[in-house]
Image (cartoon, rainbow, N blue to C red):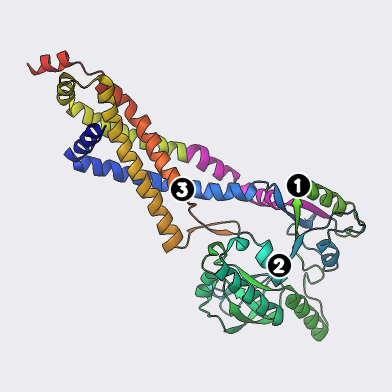
Amino acid sequence: MFRYINLIFKNLRRNLLRTILTGLGTMALVFVVTLVWSVLDFIDKQTAEKSNDFKVLVTEKNKAPSRLPRSYRSSLREGAARGPDDVRPVDYMTWAFYGGTLDPSKMSRENFLFLIACEPEKAPTMLDDLDQLGPADTARLQEGVAKMKRQANAVIIGPEQLKTMNKKVGERFTLNGLIFKDLNLEFEIVDTFPESAQRYGQTSLMNLDYLLQGIDEYEAKNKKKIANADDPIAFVMLKVKNKADYERLSAQIANSPLYTSPAVRCESASSAVSTFLEGWKDIFWGMRWILVPAILFTLALVIAVAISIGVRERRQEIAVLKVLGFRPGHVMFLVLGEALLIGVLAGLLSAAGSYLLFNKLLGGIALPIAWFQRFFIPQTAILWGIGIGALTAFLGSIVPAWSARSVRVADVFSKVA
């Protein structure tokens, strides 16, 4: 076996330029496939139904964007439960949105800030992936949440958003309201999200009670209503144990007399994401079933051409090997081995390099889709790279390898003679 492996390495070194170019071409195409699959993998996970820790969104039934009155807040947090046998959520989080500009005379991206108004203590358990942070980052996040609970105008702003705004932790600023027109609020940045919470680099959190208090104070002082102030809640997110509880909770809320004006509806978080991404459905389909197969076909073709050229150039050598006792299967193994070695190594280097580049250096793939600003390469992508390289190398080299296997010694030497 070692003899065959040694021959494979020697054959690849003989035309080093072709080997390098084939490897670089493989790496480039594996790189593109890795990026595409990383985006699709994340989207698939967001739209997949979970078997436990089921999240439910309660939104306005007949209007988008959803707007719910603040009077719905307290009862929805209990899932409209009234009796001892009713289902009660194991957790909840109320969502409202407040956005504005730091400078109304200069409406630039750097001056705009969009905040999620919520109960601060619910963010660590209700926002995806924050419960997966390490002990040090969890402690830091909890400390920031505690500051928000003690200080009404405290905000946590993602590190990327801080850079965009050219602000630092500890600074104060006033935001001139755009979502709630004329409602200007003052904030203090008490912390940022940990670096390990990479998907929240552009996310900002504020205290929901501070927003509602600001609305009340503005209307009392100015004797006029703020647009949308009567229904400032976007939706309420509830968490239940499983799908069965979700179905009972949905029926419980839908049949409750508390929510008639406006009526509400319940849907799973994954279903809500699927609905929101409906406009991207054709693009995702094209990426999955047209772009990726086309790249894989191209990759197999590149390897097939490179290996075929090598086989044609070495027909006499193959004939000599057969004279020396190499069986047709041995020859086929050598040719397949050359292709597989190039494919596997190039796929591994490309996938591992993509992981390090985007996850460790660039902070993710900057591809805004809906509210997802960045995508990250999963660790399983390294296996993808190896698998893509191996599969396309095998498919691309099987015909040249069979051709090498079928070389007839008599035909080769008769032409030489």
Foreground residue, 265 or 225?
Answer: 265
Residue sitting at x 32%, y 30%: 397
Marks 2/3: CA distance?
Answer: 32 Å
Q: Residue at x 51, y 68 (%)?
A: 195
**Dot 2 lies on which element?**
helix
Q: Name the disc covering residue 243, or none.
A: 1
Q: State the predominant SS element of the stretch in magenta.
A: helix
Residue 388 visible in the current orientation? yes
List the residue tagged with mark 2.
122
In the image: residue 328, left or right of residue 270: left
Q: Which residues are magenta?
A: 264-291
Q: Is residue 280 something that shows in the picture?
A: no
Q: Residue furthest left?
A: 417
Q: Element type at marker 1?
A: helix
Residue 60 drawn above or below residue 390: below
Q: Residue furthest bottom?
A: 221
Q: Position of residue 208 (x, y in %)?
A: 73, 73
Q: Is residue 267 magenta?
A: yes
Quadrant of the image occupied by residue 336 = top left
What residue sits right under mark 3 in the picture?
381
Instruction: Give amino acid for label 2.
Output: Lys
SS for tag 3?
helix
Q: Within 10 angstroms of label 1, few (less than 14), some, or many (20 or more) residues?
A: some
Give, as a three-letter code, the residue at label 1: Lys
